[in-house]
Amino acid sequence: MEDNIEQLKNSLKVIRKVFAGFEDYRIIGSTLVAAINNRAHRKLHDIDLLIDEKIYDEVSKRFKEQGFKKITKRAPGFEWDEYQKDNYLTFGVLLRGKFTKDYFEYKPNNYISLSIKSEYLKPTKYELYGESLRGIPVSSVYEGIKISSLNTKRKTDKDVVLNKIGNTIPSGLSLNQAFYVKLFGIRIPYLYTAFSEIYNLIGGARLAIGKSYDPWH
């Protein structure tokens, strides 16, 4: 494994500074897999985040005070911010929305919204290289990995998680139970899962012809 442990450790220290005093955010993705593994299981390139819009301006300010540059990225129908700095992992704000008692809601525009049930995002404490992480349940981490099964990195993540928890996944919400999409105010069952499965197939096909899994890379 190509070693970027120091960059990872640097980034974990930044989390403590940027999110001090805040609860309405979650770390998701492969950083949590590394925490489950108690060490980096492969080279990590970014730390993925969900953040409540009411704290986002202050979070953005703190990242900039730590020397990070904000870059806005775009894909069809989707926009997100990244915070980049040399010798650190990229912090990717995948979703910026609103935490409520029952769900997290993300609205990219006035016509569509994505809601994630709070149980799926239940704040779960992890630790990695001595730093505390506010993540999501192991069952939710695993659900996210499964839906990207053709991504080579996710196959590695899945093996690590299963090995560490003894091949028994704790019970939790499936993607179909946790995620729902509204289009023009009408709830569309299974749309998020269907989109994710199609994206996975496209990503797998791209890898097969030597391209990146994600179309925007």
Image (cartoon, grey):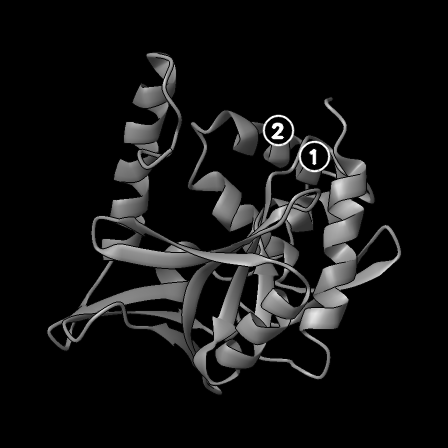
Q: Marks 1 and 2, Cα distance to the nearest angstrom?
A: 6 Å
Left or right: 190 with respect to 110? right
Position above or below: 168 against 157: below
* Residue to which mark 2 is pinned: 156
Residue 205 location, quadrant: top left
Where, quadrant-wise, is the N terminus in this rendering? top right
The residue depicted at 21 percent of the width and 55 percent of the height is 77
Q: Position of residue 75 (x, y in %)?
A: 27, 47
Graded by Cα atoms within 10 Å as few (under 14), some (14 to 19) or many (20 or more), the crowding at tag 1 reads some
Q: Residue furthest top?
A: 209
Residue 63 location, quadrant: bottom right
Where, quadrant-wise, is the C terminus in this rendering? top left
**Viewer-proximal residue, 205 or 16?**
16
Position above or below: 67 against 65: above
Q: Position of residue 115 (x, y in %)?
A: 35, 71
* Residue to which mark 1 is pinned: 160
The residue depicted at 43 percent of the width and 59 percent of the height is 81
Position above or below: 70 against 33: below
The residue depicted at 72 percent of the width and 53 percent of the height is 11
**Viewer-proximal residue, 97 or 4?**
4
Q: Residue furthest left?
A: 184
**Viewer-proximal residue, 64 or 168?**
64
